Amino acid sequence: MKSISFIKLVKPNTAIYLWSVLVLVLPLAYYNAYLGFIGALLLVYLVYYSRSVMHSQKEQLTEYVENLSFDIDNAISSTLIGLPLPMAMVDEKGSINWYNSRFAEMVQAEDLLGSSIKEHIKDIDINLIMQHKKDMEIQVTNADRHYRVIYNIVETSGVKGRKRKTGMIYFVDITDCVKAQQEMKSRSTVIALIQVDSLDEIISGIDADIISSLESEIDKRLYRWAEDIKGAIQKYDDGKYILVFEKEWLTRQQQKKFAILDEIRDINLGNPIPPTLSIGIGTNGGDPARLIQFANAAMDLAQGRGGDQAVVKVEDRLYFYGGKTREVEKKTKLKSRVIAHALRHLILQSGSVLIMTHRFADPDTLGAAVGMYRGIKSLGKNAKIIMNGTNPSIKTIYSRIMEDEEYSSLFIGCREAQSIVNGETLLIIVDTHRPGFSECPEVLPRAGNVVVIDHHRRSPDFIEDAALVYQETYASSTCELVTEILQYISEGIRIRPIEAEALLAGIIIDTKNFTYKTGVKTFEAASFLRRMGADTTAVKQLFQDDMDTFVARAETVKNARMVHGSIAISVCPEGIESPLLVTAQAANSLLDIRGVKAAFVLCKYNQNIFISGRSLGEINVQLIMESLGGGGHMTVAGVQLTGVEVEEARVMLEEALNQYIEEGDV
């Protein structure tokens, strides 16, 4: 600071010089008037000269600044006008206040002043731009060209101090870059795993010549398909293939809904069972290892959902195509024997065993749980069943079970289950594979081992890391699968009559009295249960309805209306005691009406909306219910909706039906 003051002090200053001359002139005038007069004239001249010079310098500086400002303005204007980027100046509402010729060329319009920029560029969000967020990238499309939007927002004070915003928007053409990215994506690698479903079942019992012709025809059609999509296919096992192709062909196959599924299904060379494919496709995985991982996960889903479909896994998203045919029943019991032995080993090495049903238990899950209880007891272990209370659909059979003292402490709630589950616990889940549908999802991560026994088609949100999964979509019910397991889990097992009746009840309900999804194994399971003491008359009595339930079901059927010519939709009356039971029964009853191919019945229960879907097989109700967040089988499916009313749920259902019809799945 001192050095700066010193510099200012010694710096030449005209005023100091003039004051110095005045100080010298005054004494001189005192002693010599003549010399003082000359000195005064000199002082006046110096003052005049100094002021003239200062004025001239000021004018020159002013002129320089004005010229510089003018040059800058001209340079800026010329630059803006001549800049090869389309530009427009807009106000807060998006009205165009200024634009350059490039912008007019871009939007192919003239006289744009005062018009809204939204009129010319449809997908631009002026409100988003005016927020002026940092690191926010905006892209727009106009006339098949892609632009990155760069903007600068200036806030000024207008009339009466009201603040207003003005934005200068620049459009950088990135079309070539976008096309290059799209080209790279279209040429990225896709890996597909292909497998002929139930090949052993298809070729069993037919002549060797037909088998050879069938396998040759499948190979020919698959290799021709691979050639059409410019892919490389390799057969690595009987009925198993791996296919590598570029992503642009995947998009085309998705648009065609994988027509190869229909081509393979149409092969008929004297084979009684038509061949079908399961295709698992992995894409957008980056490296080949992840693509194979995605393809394997997709293949597991395709087969877990019954086959005859393609599943595309794109990172965390899944897309399903096909799934139009019913599952082929496996005649061999080898798998059930292997599962029974593995389950036996898990039970014996566990510290405790818990069996868990799904929410809103039905006869199938209850019968399967009771059957598993008997299998565990036959191995000298005890078990508990996690089930949070009863409901009208199982009220009668549950009451019959609880009449026996042995079962008085068999059922526990979720809270008690959480208090006893630990790392030594074996948790067996029956009739569901979805964590959110289980009776107590909280115990899943705390159990040492988890076993899943289910007959539903696999959904994307299945239970991960299960030690053992027995999921057979061909089976009529989970009770059928459990009955098979019981025959191999322990030698000479004896099932109590009430347990056998509970298992038989689950089979009868899910097959609608042995009408749907009934195979050879279904009758074999029923025969075994009959030998174990199941009374068919007693089982029938379990399903008898009271008068109110019968009337409510009849009213629901009466109020049904038809959509798309062959699909019935109805709503269960409110205020009845057993809405879930009536809903399922009414959906089944509607299928007895001539011309009805599928039926959907809605009801409100505990502030949620339930939809039961039933079909004769031509319409896949599973796909329809999955689009609403539910699931099931081709002929039996359902969904639970929260946060909506009955009429909203009906609209959602009709939209799902419209989409299903438009996609040509009927």
Image (tube, helix red, strand yellow):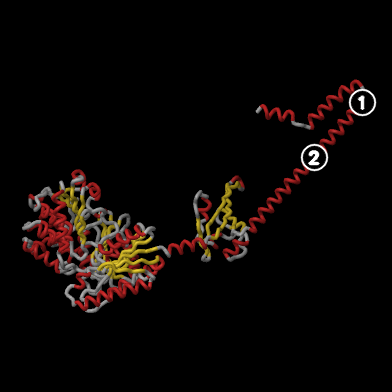
- Disc 1 marks which residue? 35
Q: Nearer the viewer, residue 222 or 644?
A: 222
Question: Which image quadrant for residue 574?
Answer: bottom left
Q: Nearer the viewer, residue 108 or 211?
A: 211
In the shown orientation, is residue 44 left or right of residue 378?
A: right
Residue name at image x 60 percent, y 47 percent: 156
Question: Which image quadrant for residue 526?
Answer: bottom left
In the shown orientation, is residue 9 left or right of residue 545?
A: right
Residue 363 makes an appearance in the image: no
User: Mark 2 touching mark 1, by CB under 8 A?
Assistant: no
Rendering coords of residue 638 (x, y %) = 26, 61
Number of disc labels: 2
Cα gap from disc 2 to disc 1, whole angstroms? 30 Å
The C terminus, quarter of image? bottom left
Residue 335 makes an appearance in the image: yes
Note whether 439 is above or below 545 in the view shown.
Answer: above
The N terminus, quarter of image? top right
- Disc 2 marks which residue? 55
Rendering coords of residue 631 (x, y %) = 27, 61
**Disc 2 secondary structure class:** helix
In the shown orientation, is residue 3 left or right of residue 603?
A: right
Which residue type does callout 1 highlight?
A: Leu
- Would you call the spot at circle 2 few (<14 residues within 10 Å), some (14-19), or many (20 or more)? few
Which residue type does callout 2 highlight?
A: His
- Would you call the spot at circle 1 few (<14 residues within 10 Å), some (14-19), or many (20 or more)? some
Rendering coords of residue 73 (x, y %) = 68, 51
